[in-house]
Image: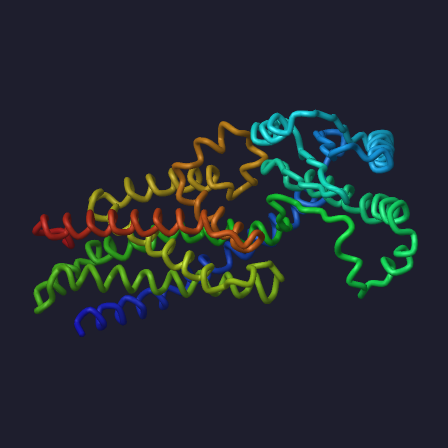
């Protein structure tokens, strides 16, 4: 009951701070609007086709002169009209290796009778590889399929043009490996600006503790029959609750008003946001006990937050910053939460989500343990 009373007191105190609450809600929304508009061209229209390099292997047993001639004509046309470069290799393992090393935009492995294309995409060139996929799919649907059908069963041509025909599904199959939708600028910054402002919520956890010392109220509360662990638990849970409310206000506004895409699995998205909020508030609470001077702790947070956000792809996608920055970015928890949310929303994959949950919960336990240990060790921890 004591903890609930402290949580209630903390909620009222935080919610009465109208200026801070407005800042924590309006600031990310304004950034989403501004950055979404400013970088819309980067996400949608700034692709240089001449930089698109495609490696391919035609691995059809016995050969298929009709298809090979059609595909060769397609490659020549795309090269002449758009500058897209095509290169053939007979080594499938080399083709996959080149994609893993990010030397080509895409690798096409053409096999089977009727032809099947497996497309391997360079994960750092999502937009460009999407162009390749669309071009190849269009070519196959409009040209290669008709030639294969006419050669094998001309009578089936009339049937294949019927959209509901069962024959329509088995002649040419395109499989895009690592296929994914791409976020627009508003979609991307809705995610990254939310995680940015939540990282600044570490200041909420910090001032929740330090404000009691500055107002000389912490020691007075502990003169009552209140244990230190009860007081600390109530303060942290209250700050976490306010932070979560602020986060969901931003999320709902970006989804309903700005029409940002938050995917179908909102439950997992919410769980990730909640665990991330717990981690950020816990960080602030720990720093409140580590540094007795507010200026030092606040200065440290204001220094490391922009660095972590940059390494997490908060300002521009990591794919635009090069491999070296991407390797260093593993130290940033912002990178894992951003990657987890974007992967869930646009790919439906959860591997990064598990890593982000482990990072968030692991750091939360560490920071809360530090805060609890220091508050119990120091007699005047709240003074």
On the picture, is 269 further left or further right than 292?
right
On the picture, is 157 further left or further right than 257?
right
Q: Of 73 and 220, which appears nearest the observer?
A: 73
Q: Is residue 262 visible?
A: yes
The percent position of residue 246, horizontal first and vertical second, equals: 43, 62
The percent position of residue 158, horizontal first and vertical second, equals: 91, 59
Q: How many marks?
A: 0
Query: What's the residue at 57%, 27% (across, down)?
Result: 101
- Residue 364, above or below 257: above
Tell me which colouring the rendered structure shows.
rainbow
Query: What's the residue at 72%, 41% (across, down)?
Result: 112
- Residue 52, above or below 34: above
Q: Of 298 and 304, which appears nearest the observer?
A: 304
Q: Quadrant of residue 80?
A: top right
On the picture, is 298 further left or further right than 268?
left
> Extreme bottom residue here?
1
Query: What's the residue at 19%, 54% (across, down)?
Result: 213
On the picture, is 249 further left or further right than 148?
left
Q: Is residue 196 visible?
A: no
Q: Quadrant of residue 71?
A: top right
For the N terminus, which image quadrant?
A: bottom left
The percent position of residue 135, horizontal first and vertical second, equals: 78, 42
The percent position of residue 336, horizontal first and vertical second, equals: 44, 45
Query: What's the residue at 45%, 47% (across, down)?
Result: 352
């Amino acid at each position: 009951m004591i903890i609930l009373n402290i949580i209630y007191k903390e909620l009222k105190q935080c919610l009465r701070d109208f200026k801070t609450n407005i800042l924590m809600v309006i600031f990310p929304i304004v950034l989403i609007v501004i950055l979404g508009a400013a970088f819309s061209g980067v996400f949608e229209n700034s692709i240089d086709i001449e930089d698109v390099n495609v490696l391919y292997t035609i691995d059809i047993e016995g050969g298929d002169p009709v298809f090979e001639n059609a595909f060769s004509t397609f490659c020549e046309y795309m090269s002449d009209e758009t500058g897209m470069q095509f290169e053939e290799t007979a080594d499938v393992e080399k083709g996959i290796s080149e994609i893993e090393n990010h030397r080509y935009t895409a690798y096409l492995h053409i096999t089977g009778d009727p032809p099947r294309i497996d497309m391997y995409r360079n994960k750092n060139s999502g937009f460009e590889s999407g162009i390749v996929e669309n071009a190849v799919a269009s070519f196959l649907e409009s040209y290669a399929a008709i030639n294969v059908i006419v050669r094998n069963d001309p009578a089936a041509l009339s049937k294949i043009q019927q959209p509901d025909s069962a024959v329509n599904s088995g002649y040419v199959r395109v499989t895009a490996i690592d296929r994914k939708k791409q976020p627009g600028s508003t979609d991307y910054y809705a995610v990254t600006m939310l995680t940015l402002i939540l990282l600044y919520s570490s200041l909420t956890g910090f001032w929740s503790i330090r404000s009691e010392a500055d107002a000389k109220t912490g020691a007075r509360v502990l003169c009552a029959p209140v244990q230190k662990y009860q007081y600390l638990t109530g303060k942290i849970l209250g700050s976490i609750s306010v932070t979560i409310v602020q986060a969901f206000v931003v999320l709902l506004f970006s989804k309903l008003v700005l029409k940002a895409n938050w995917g179908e699995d909102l439950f997992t998205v919410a769980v990730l946001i909640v665990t991330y909020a717990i981690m950020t508030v816990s960080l602030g609470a720990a720093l409140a006990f580590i540094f007795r001077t507010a200026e030092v702790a606040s200065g440290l947070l204001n220094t490391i937050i922009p660095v972590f956000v940059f390494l997490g792809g908060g300002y521009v996608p990591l794919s635009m910053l090069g491999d070296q920055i991407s390797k260093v970015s593993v130290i940033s928890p912002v990178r894992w939460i951003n990657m987890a949310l974007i992967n869930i929303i646009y790919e439906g994959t959860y591997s990064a989500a598990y890593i982000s949950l482990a990072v968030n919960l692991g750091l939360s336990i560490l920071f809360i343990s530090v805060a609890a240990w220091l508050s119990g060790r120091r007699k005047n921890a709240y003074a």
